[in-house]
Structures are given as structure tokens and as C-alpha cells.
Amino acid sequence: MADPASNKNGTARLADLKAKAGYVPVIRRNGFVYAFLSLLVLYAIFLLPAKGSPETLDLGRIILFCLLLLVWAILIFTDELKPEKMKTVIVFTIFIIAAWLYYRYSTARWGEMGFLFFNLEMIQKAWPTLVEGFWTTLLLAVCAAIMSTIIGLLLAIFRSFENRVLNFFIIAYVDFFRAMPIIVLMMLIYYALPFMGIRLSAIVSGILALGLNSSAYVSEIFRAGFLSVKKGQIEAANALGLNPIQTMRYVILPQAFRVVIPPLVGNYVASAKDTALASSISIIELLKAGLSQKSLLANPSPLIFVTALYLIMFVPLTRFSGYLEKRMKASQRQVRL
Amino acid sequence: MNDAETMIEVVDLHKHFKDLHVLRGISTTVKQSEVVAVMGPSGSGKSTFLRCLNRLEEPSSGHIYIEGVDILAPYIDINRVRTEIGMVFQSFNLFPHLTAIENIKLAPMSVRKLSDKEAVDRGMALLEKVDLAEKADTYPEQLSGGQQQRVAIARALAMQPQIMFFDEPTSALDPEMIGEVLDVMRNMAKEGMTMMVVSHEMGFIKEAADRILFLVDGEVVEDGTPDHIFNRTTHERTLEFLSKII
Amino acid sequence: MSTRPDNTHKFVRTHPSWSVWLRRPPVVALSFALLASYAVFLLPSAETESSLLFYLNINLFILYVLFCTGNVLADGKKPESLKMLVALALIAIMCWLFYRYSGAEWHRLREFFFNWEKLQGKWWILWQGLEVTLLLAFISGIGSVLIGLLVAILHTLHSPTLNFFLRVYIDVFRSIPMIVIMVFIFFALPFMGISLGSIVTTVLALSLGYGAYATECFRAGIESVHTGQLEAARSLGLSRWKTISKIILPQAFPVVIPPLTGILVAMLKDTAVASIVAAPELLKRARELYTSETNPTPLVAAALIYLMVLIPLVRVVNVLENKLGKKRSR
Ligand SMILES: Nc1ncnc2c1ncn2[C@@H]1O[C@H](COP(=O)(O)OP(=O)(O)O)[C@@H](O)[C@H]1O
Ligand SMILES: [Mg+2]
């Protein structure tokens, strides 16, 4: 490739190519991978500190081991030519090694693990409170959703009138509630307002804070929906002789809905997740129920159960809203490098 | 097998997309400096065929020898093979965040490890060749389709490939721009570049191509000189297709 | 002179639509007269027992107000000055309603909400809290961006096994509320022999949680780069890593920046949750002051500080997103 003007003297370059085609960089060779692995094994046998809680220096040795392991894995994963089976095996190997390291060096009392974590008896004891907490969470989520939809829709409609005075106030409202952390808002409403004579129950405070916060986002979503319908569409509808109601019914709403529904669902899910914050103002919702039972029984089982419950509830919801959003996007390509 | 002569040899190439059998056993050879046109109805697998040859798609089975090297062998560094094969796409695929000259010099600098000066010199020479020297510092979105495609050709040539693939290089162009791109390709053919061109530009093929591969449903139904295919073929599918595009 | 047939009847409105009828000046005037009489005669007095009827009555009034004002504001033909007047009236009515029915004792506002004397010499506590908040946000911000970038790039390797675990990571941390992550790390992990301080807990929770969001955002950015770009790069012989660093990331970044900024701002907001695990950040310090002074002024001050920091950021995010939206629609 030294000679720039060569397309014809292929033979010289052919030899070059042939010489190099079989050349695999050292770090990509299988031998290297296995050598590295045996090095790791040797390290594990001879250099890793003894069982038990590690000292600072030993900690360094453990961390170095982890880093080496990581480098080894990355070398394999970035190689397109390594078979997928090998990569699968390696993922699991790493999990096993991590578990082993944890087992070896953590101070956990292994004998009590079952008692501490998956203690059905404790969960049974906590069950009534947890169920109550679940219903409270649901109540908070639903009420906040309804409240935010009503307020958000009204705000979006009045925003669409393009009145400068009104817009100023609406924008201020939206910015205020988008900038204010929900937990701060809750505490203001629950702890500060009573000093002014506005006494709201914990539940109402929670709903109010969640709903106000969410309404700011909902109004933006609806606004985007209204704006997404192009002027040309309305003109086209007018040109067809549709009256305002028909235009709304057949042209604007169907188009706006397609834009509004996915983020709206996403917002409800986010707002439902935020109900967990209500535990900070002593509402016994799911998280608070788990926490209080944990302290009462001196056993983390309820808390772990609650976390699992959040997972079970929200993984499908998050996935669903993600699916809606994906479907909204026109083209959806997989990237393959 | 005579290495100096044969640039590409394909043996019984198959490609499946899940259940879809797109290439059904293609075998052919391309000699040095040969210009091979690939024709066939839409969806017959022309693009897939070319993309298998530089492994942008992974073939399901078969063998591909580029300059005598089996590029499907496990030890092959496919990036090195690709540097030997320039590819020009229907949609140009210039990198929009880089200027014309930056587009061209990127690969020589980062793959061939040329210095900035060498790469720019080479790039300017190539831009000169495709008649776009004055557009060196322009971003792709400010270039016309024909100009973009010529920059894309220069970009592929900057790696000094042995082989050039063209996948419908003029299909996305307005009629008045097709000529300028074809001119560049014609010159390359004259200079002895080995080329595989998916195209339906009859004039260009008649003049520049040495051979035509006619693909239908992933199979080579005819393989012959332009004269043979255009004037003396008796194959039913070929005739049907030709009657549509003329 | 040609004699054309008279076609006027074809175009005359025979059934005036109700929206036209509603917008005629006398009807508008009447609606506002009704509004005034409703306010004077039907609205309950502030002292009455708050029953369901009470709230229904007020809400009905609000709806009617919105209807009357909306009717004027939505009409393109009404003069601008009238609309301005109506808008001001709407705002005034809303403020008045709140003033009258919220049950607030307004004279206490000064004493309990803006009692700056109570904070004299104690502002440094809040500033310290703010420092901690910003520090937490900064470190976790870096952490989450790094995690997001790493996971997104690992995703492009397209190894099914790896992708499965990456997917699990993303799903888990996007699904569990941030406060639950923190509480779990802080209150449950010690039973497993892993005790982390409140600061480490917060940083870990925020980085992992928002790392999952950042991943999604980077992935969307990477996917927004057209496949043709990858093919062109790969056919030039650029390696996978070169393709990512020279072609994909430069093109993905403009797409990624606005949502990423949004995520980071959301993270800054969520640092307030760390007060639950006793991280000494702004909200926690304010609550301590609130307890020791038995006066909510520190809470109000903290809220104002949050607003001062976050409103400009929220505005920035807004502008960035609008810009992106415009670019997309082009
Ligand atoms: N990535 C892909 N996944 C699934 N099917 C594909 C893919 N690429 C191409 N195909 C299918 O393969 C067939 C041949 O495609 P292509 O090679 O692009 O045809 P041509 O270029 O001749 O028009 C088509 O039916 C197409 O739908
Ligand atoms: Mg094609």
C-alpha cells in the first residue's frame, strides 16, 4: 500500500494481504485468553487474601483481581470472532466468581440468611399491614392521576389560547412544579401549611403534592399533543367543510391522541412510582408499611418483600409504557456493528 | 487457480434471513480488472449478494475467496478484507458530521495510519479526480446528490482498494446528476479497477461492463457479456425484465 | 349583462352552529352577569362547615368561570384588549377563591413562613446542605453517565447473553422507585454484611438508578444514527471501536444531550430523597432546623433554594428539548 497509484500491481499487495490475513493480534488469540485465565486462577490461589473480612491492603488485592477479571471479560466480549457460547459461559463464570468472592469476604452471618431474608413467617406477620399499604399506594396513584389529568388538561387548553398574561402564569405554574422536588413539596404541605391554619390529612397532602407535580408534566404533554397537529391539517379539514366539532373529532383528536397517550402513560407510571415518597410524611403506603414492619419485627424480610413487589408491579408497567413509546416512533431499527 | 487473474471467487453461497432463503447457491468468479454488472428484479438479492461479499451480512454457507483468501475462515480479520473492497451505497452514507475531506481522510488515517498531511494530499488528489476539489471543506448536507455520491466514491478510493462494489449508485439521484457519477465510474473502469456494479443504467453497462450477472430470486439465471444478454438472450425471465426497464 | 342564476342560498348558513351563537356579545355579557350573580348569591361563605356540598358548589363555580373565560379567550374575533381583561379577571377570581376558601390564616404568613430572624446566623447550615446536595448530584451525575455510556456500548456488541443481563439491570433500576432503592441499600443490605454510609448509599443509588435511564437515552441516540452510516464505516474497514468513537458517538451526542440533561436535572431533584437515609443534604438540614426552631421557615427557605437552583435548569432543559423537536420535525 506504499505506492499510491497502484490498482494494477495487485500481486505485490496480494502477498502482503496473504501474509497478514492469517495474522491475529496477540490479545485476540485463543492461547492468550487461556493463558490469561490460568494467570487469574494462579492469582486466586496464591495471592488472594485468606477468608474473612479483609484489611485495606488485602482489599487492594481483591480489587486488582476483580479488575483483571473484568479486563479478561472485556477482551473476549469485544471480539466478534469468539463464539457466542464462550461468551455465555463467561458471563456466568463472572457471576459465580463474584458470588464466591462475596461469600468469602463478607461478614454476613450465613447461617441466618434464610431467617433474615426469606422468612415467610415474618412476612405473614406483616401481611395485614402490607396489604393495607398496597391499597394506600393504589389510592394515592389513582387520585393523583385523576387530579393531574384534570388540571393538566385545563392548563393545556388555556395555554392554547395564546394569551400573554395567562401564559405567563401557566408557565410559572408549570416551571414551579417541575422544579420543586416532590418530597420537598410534600413536606411543605404536610409540615409547614398547618402553621398557617391549613390542616390537611397526610393522605390529602400526599395526593395534592403528587397531583400538582404530575399536572405540570401532563399539561406539557397535552400541549405537545395539540401542537403536533399541524396547521395544515386544520386548514385541510376546513377546506373539506368540516365544522369545528367534526374537525376536533375526526382530525385533531385522533392525531393528538397518538402523540399524547405514550408519554401520558409514562407519566402515570412515574407518578405511581413517586407514591413511595409519601412514606416521608408518615403515610403508611407500601414502602412505609415494609419499613415499619421491618423495625417492628427486627427482620428485613418485609422490606425485601416490598422491594420485590415494586419490581413485580412496575417492570411490566415500565415495559408497557416503553413499548407504547417505541411504537409511536416511526422507524425502529436495530443497530448492529 | 490462477491468483493473479482471479480477484473474487464465490462458491455455492447461501444466505437465509430467518425463514427467507435470499441467496440460493451463487457461484461465480470475477477476474482482475473485470467490470461485472449485477442485474435483476427488486428483491432478488443483489444487495444481499454484494453485502455478503464483504461480510456486512454474514453468509449462511458457502465460500468466498477474495484474492485467493477464504474470507470466511475464522482467523480472518474482516476489517483488513474490507479495506481491500471499496463500497458505494445507494444512499451515499456520507458521515454528516464531517466535511468532504474529513470524510475521505478518516479511514486512511485511522486504519492505514497515514499522517494527516499524506491523507489530505491523497484526499485532495481524489477530489480532483472526481472534480470536486473546491468542495473539500463543505458538509454533506450542502452538496447535491451527485456531488455526495462522488465524494462517497472518493472516500472508498482513498483506501486504495483492489475491488469496488457499487450498490445502485445512481438510483437515488435526479436524472441530470446521474451522468457525472457514471463518468467517474467509467474512468475507474478504464483504469483497470475490478468492479461489481448493481445498476440498471443500460448505457453504462453496455459500454463499461465486461459481464452481466442476472439474478432472479437469489439464483444466477444468466451470466454473459452485455451483447449476449441484451441482444441474443432467450431466457424468459431475462427478456421479461429487460422489456420492463427499456 | 349576463344573467347568472342566484346561488346565494347555497352558501347562507341555515343552522347557525352553537359555537357561533355562544360567542355573540349579548350571550357573553349575559354569561358574565350570571357569573357575578353566582358569586354574590350562591357561593358559600368562608365560615360555613366544609361539607361535600360546599366543595361541589365551589368546583361548579370554578368550572363555570373557566367556561365563561374560555369562551371569550378561544374566540379569534374578539379584540385583544377584551381578552387581556378576561385573562386578568380569571387570575383575579382564582386568587380570590384561594384567599377566601383555603382557610389560611394569612396574618401568620410572616411569622411562620418568612421569619428570617429565626434563620439569622444559621444560613450556613443550609448552604452546607446545598453544598452536599450539589456534590452528591455531581458525583452521581458522572457515575450515571459513565454507567449509561458503558452499558449502551456493551449493548451494541449484540451478545444475547450479555444483553439479557443488561436488560435486567435496566428494567430493575427503572422500575423501582429511587426512594426504595435507597431504603433497600441503607436498611436491608446491612443484614447481608454490606453496610454503606448514607453518602455512599445515595451516590450508589442515584448512579445505578439514573445510569439505567442514561443507558436508555444513549441507546436511543445510538439507534438514531442511520444503519447506512455503520455500513459505510464498516465497509471502509474501520474497526468496531473506531466506528463507535468516530462515527456513531459524534452523531449520537446532539440527539442525546437534551434528554440526558433532563435526566441529570431530575437526578439533582432526587437528591432530596437522600434525606430519608440521613444524608446531610439541603432538605435534611432544613428539617433539622425546622425541628429545633419549631418554625417552618427553614423548610420554606430550602424550597426557595431548590427553586432558585432548579428553575433555570428546567428552563434550559425545556429550550434544549424544543430545539431537538424542531430539528426532528424538519
Ligand atoms: N436484514 C434483512 N432482514 C430480513 N430480510 C432481508 C434483510 N435484507 C434483505 N432482506 C430480504 O432479502 C431479499 C433480497 O433483498 P435485497 O438483496 O435488498 O434485494 P435487491 O437489492 O435485489 O432489491 C428481500 O426479499 C428482502 O426483503
Ligand atoms: Mg438493493
Image (tube, helix red, strand yellow):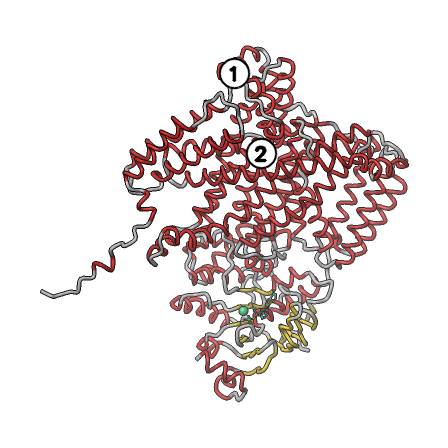
The residue beneath circle 1 is C114
Q: State the residue in front, B171 or C48.
A: C48
| A82 sits to left or right of C143 | right
Which quadrant of the figure contains the C terminus of chain A? bottom right
Q: Chain of mark 1?
A: C
Q: State the residue in front, A165 or B111.
A: A165
Q: Callout 2: 10 Å neighbours few (<14), some, many (20+)?
A: many
- Above/below status of B27 relative to C142: below
- Above/below status of C308 relative to B220: above
| Amino acid type at image mark 2 | Leu
Residue A174, percent from left and from top? 48, 34
Gap between marks 1 and 2, in whole Å? 25 Å
Q: Residue at x 67, y 71 (%)?
A: B64
Q: Residue at x 46, y 82 (%)?
A: B243
SS for callout 2? helix
- Say yes or no: labels 1 and 2 on the same chain: no
| A27 sits to left or right of C246 | right
Point out the quarter of the image occupied by ligand 1: bottom right
Q: Chain of mark 2?
A: A
Rendered image quadrant of residue C190: top right
SS for callout 1? loop
Q: Is residue B245 visible?
A: yes
Residue C227, percent from left and from top? 57, 58
| Amino acid type at image mark 1 | Phe
Q: Is residue A170 visible?
A: no
The residue beneath circle 2 is A210
Residue C44, percent from left and from top? 45, 26
